[in-house]
Every structure is written in C-alpha cells, then in structure tokens.
Amino acid sequence: PRPFVIVGFSLGGALALGYAGHSGADCLADRIVAVNPPVDVGACVDAVDAPGNSLYRRYFVRRLCRLVRLSRRYIEIAGPEASPRLVRGLRHFDELFTAPSGGFANTEAYYTQGSACRVIDRIRRPALVLSAKDDPFIPYRIFLDCHGRSGTSVEYLHPECGGHGGYWQWRRPRFWLLEVLLRQLRLAARGR
C-alpha cells in the first residue's frame, strides 16, 4: 500500500538513509525520515567514548559484551573474552569484535563502509534528517559535510535541543517530534 514511509531512529535512521542512498531511484519508500542518525559512525563512536559520556559508554560496552557472550553460544565470534573490564570503549569493542567479525580490514574500513553520509548524495526520494544540536552521541558537526553533499531530496532539521530523541517540550506542541513525523506522513500521502 502507498504511501510507504520509512521512519528510523538512531541506528535505524542511519540504516534507512543508507538504504535510500544505495538504492537511489530504485528506493521503494516514498519518503524517508531519520531521527538522530549516526551518519558518520566513527565520529559518533568517538562521541560516546568521550569522557563526558562515560556513563553511556559503560552501559553500551556492558550490553555489547553480553551480546557477544550470548551469541558465542550459537556462533563463532573471534576475539578475546567479552568482558567490560577488558573492553575500554566502543571503538575498542569494534576493533576486537565488530570489524573482524564483519570481514573488514580494520575499524576505519568498517566505519567508512557503515556511514550513511557517504551515500546521502544518492538519495532520490524526499528525506528528512532530524537531529538535535545537543545530542550527546551524534555530534551536530557531522551533518555539515552531509549538508554540502546532499541533493535537493534531503532536508535537514537541527533544533537547538532534544538530546538523543527526547523532543518533548513544555509549550505546544508538547510532543514536537510526533508533530514533525505526522507532517511527513501527510506530505507522503499527498504525493509530495
């Protein structure tokens, strides 16, 4: 059924943009909305690994190590013991597990290949990239390169605040993100 709109949050947003960029004119979606997408994987990993985000870094590393331990029950995953006390951050995790398991020569190759910003200029469907300037994981500066590389199909919206997807506010509309998403759906329904 039409319209077909892809809405992705965080990593899902980066995947949606990557799909639209790789597909170009063959993209099946009528419209794409990416909320706080890590379009430059390396820069976003560095942001999570920054000293001010140590609480988040520890949380993600614990979860990722647990996932490796659980996965090893069913599949072979190369690398050392998946222990948060041995893994120093997300970049280190990717060096130990992600890049080798994905068949990448190194972490930088993985980050380059996995970054949606490198294919954003190939998007041929209307797309909205929404990311707050105060997101602790997605540095606003990564979008500046994308702005210059995007065609007219991609629109950017960068409010001053909203964190990593918490776009509610005290004044109306209180649930601002929902209003933005509904507007995108209406535009798709009108064929625009």
Image (cartoon, rainbow, N blue to C red):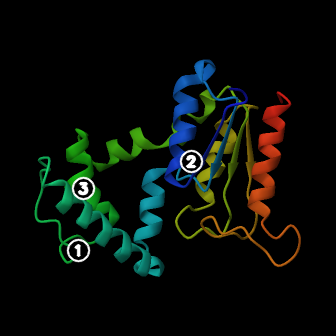
* Amino acid, disc 2: Gly
* Amino acid, disc 3: Glu
Please tell me which of labels 3 and 2 falls first in the chain: 2
Residue at (24%, 66%) from the top-left corner? 66
Q: How many marks?
A: 3
Please tell me which of labels 3 and 1 falls first in the chain: 1
Task: Give the class, few, some or many, for how many residues have Cα within 10 Å of label 1's Cα (few <14, many ≥20).
Answer: some
Lateral position of residue 141 relative to residue 175, left or right = left
Lateral position of residue 101 relative to residue 19, left or right = left
User: Which SS class for mark 1?
Assistant: loop
Per the model, the C-alpha gap separating discs 3 and 1 is 14 Å
User: Which SS class for mark 2?
Assistant: helix
Residue that numbered label 1 is attached to:
84
Give the answer, above or below, for where 131 lies relative to 124. below
Whole-percent x, y for residue 110 in the image:
34, 44
Residue that numbered label 3 is attached to:
95
Which of discs 3 and 2 lies nearer the camera? The answer is 2
Which of discs 3 and 1 lies nearer the camera? The answer is 1
Residue that numbered label 2 is attached to:
13
